[in-house]
Image (cartoon, rainbow, N blue to C red):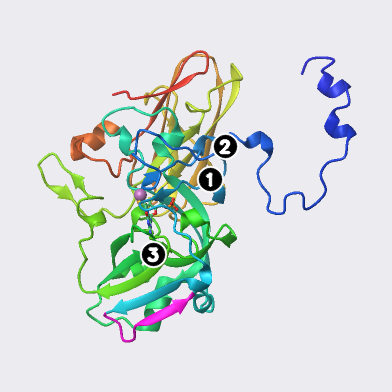
Amino acid sequence: MAAGDPLITEVQDWNRYLGDGVDANPYGTPSQFEAHVVRKNVPWLTSDAISSINFTPLHALDGIITPNGLCFERHHGGVAVIEPTAHRLMINGLVDKPLVFTMDDLKRFPRENKVYFLECAANSGMEWRGAQLNGCQFTHGMLHCVMYTGVPLRTILAEAGVKTEGRWLLAEGADASAMTRSIPMEKALDDCLVAFGMNGEALRAEQGYPLRLVVPGWEGNMWVKWLRRLEVGDKPWQQREETSKYTDLLPDGKSRRFTWAMDVKSVITNPSPQAPIKHGKGPLVLSGLAWSGQGTIKRVDVTLDGGRNWHTARLDGPSLPKALHRFYYEFDWDGSELFLQSRAIDEQGFIQPTKDQLRSVRGSNSIYHNNGIQTWYVNKDGGIENVEIS
Ligand code: MTE
Ligand code: CO
């Protein structure tokens, strides 16, 4: 705040001239000065944009809710464009009466509003063998958290009447990939939703408009978008996405299967490689996200020196089960090098492991379910890099 700052002493254009009136932008968009806050992909990761992924800009967000336009996208066959009056949800298999619902039918059942994170099982998958991508957007951005509006899946199942042999549910998408996953009946009857709303508005096309399955705490692949069919059966269907994909090859040649729940995890979003320290020494707000597919987050610890000393972070905002939690740790930066890490502990007592601990059990063939502790190296100029320390 220099004396004679012209931004204080001189009248600015925005102070002198009238602005746009109402309705200049009937569906509001972010300020033009926030144009850099966008989803981004990693071009070398996939060969085309149809079966691809982009990433949520976690370093540019705060709180626990992801704005709809910034929720990462993962499509196996592109975005299906479905006119809602032409959408149907069918339920068949081991049920008393097979049914077909229109969107209007679904909106006549009692509905719920619930905040949940969605994490792709492949989130942080590129980091299994070592530090690779510079930015939490790319290392941790297959993650979003929104408030869903939808009908409990158990309500739909009760309407059709599940036969006693009905132990499994197949969910199928209406997109060109016809994404299909088997879900155990206990989970279907527990907390799954058939959702048509996100953050107060209709689902975005990218997120499965007009209807998607919400499978709280479980890997994103099971959250079938453009949901068109539910089949009740007595055993899992052994679809591609639960055999050759979404299984983890262990060092002994066996594979872990049906690893549905997303384990306790956290990441420091600020400072981070895409959000370096620009203000020099002095007060610094460190911030990050923690989550667990097992419930709420009990505690987050933060270290500035690569794990020698740990400090308890401050959790702020709602603490909802299977939702993102926001943490802060405020300190005075003395301008020295830092090795920043965060470690989350969930309500069940599960503690986020180091990457070495994870690899000692799971080897390094895996892609999925990397919940290891992330390290950011901060240099004396405030520049930041993704590194691993052991
Ligand atoms: N559902 C359909 N129908 N088609 C898909 O390609 N991708 C899955 C899942 N559901 C997919 C789908 C995967 S792998 C993930 S991680 C999530 O949707 C991503 O959800 P999002 O695009 O809303 O972030
Ligand atoms: Co996925």
- Label 2 element class: loop
- Which numbered mark, 3 or 2, is in the foreground of this view? 3
Q: Would you name the residue on which mark 3 appears? A: 174
Q: Is residue 138 magenta?
A: no
Q: Distance between the Cα atoms at labels 1 and 2?
A: 8 Å
Residue 275 visible: yes
Looking at the rendered structure, the kind of residue marked 3 is Ala
> Residue 230's spot in the image, x, y percent?
34, 72
- For badge 2, the amino acid type reads Val
Question: Could you say which is closer to the camera, residue 15 or residue 5?
Answer: 15
Q: Which residues are magenta?
A: 94-102
Task: Give whichever of discs 1 and 2 has the lower sequence position.
Answer: 2
Query: Is 318 left, or right, of 178 in this rendering?
Result: right
Q: Is mark 3 within 8 Å of ligand 1?
A: yes
As measured in the structure, the alpha-carbon distance from the residue carrying label 3 to the one carrying label 1 is 23 Å
Task: Give x and y (percent) for residue 89.
Answer: 41, 73
Mark 3 or mark 2: name the one nearer the start of the chain.
2
Q: Is the CB–ligand 1 distance for label 1 below 8 Å?
A: no
Residue at 44%, 34% (x, y): give it. Answer: 136
Residue 302 drawn at (x, y percent): 44, 32
Q: Is residue 82 above or below residue 106?
A: above
The circle drawn on residue 70 is 1
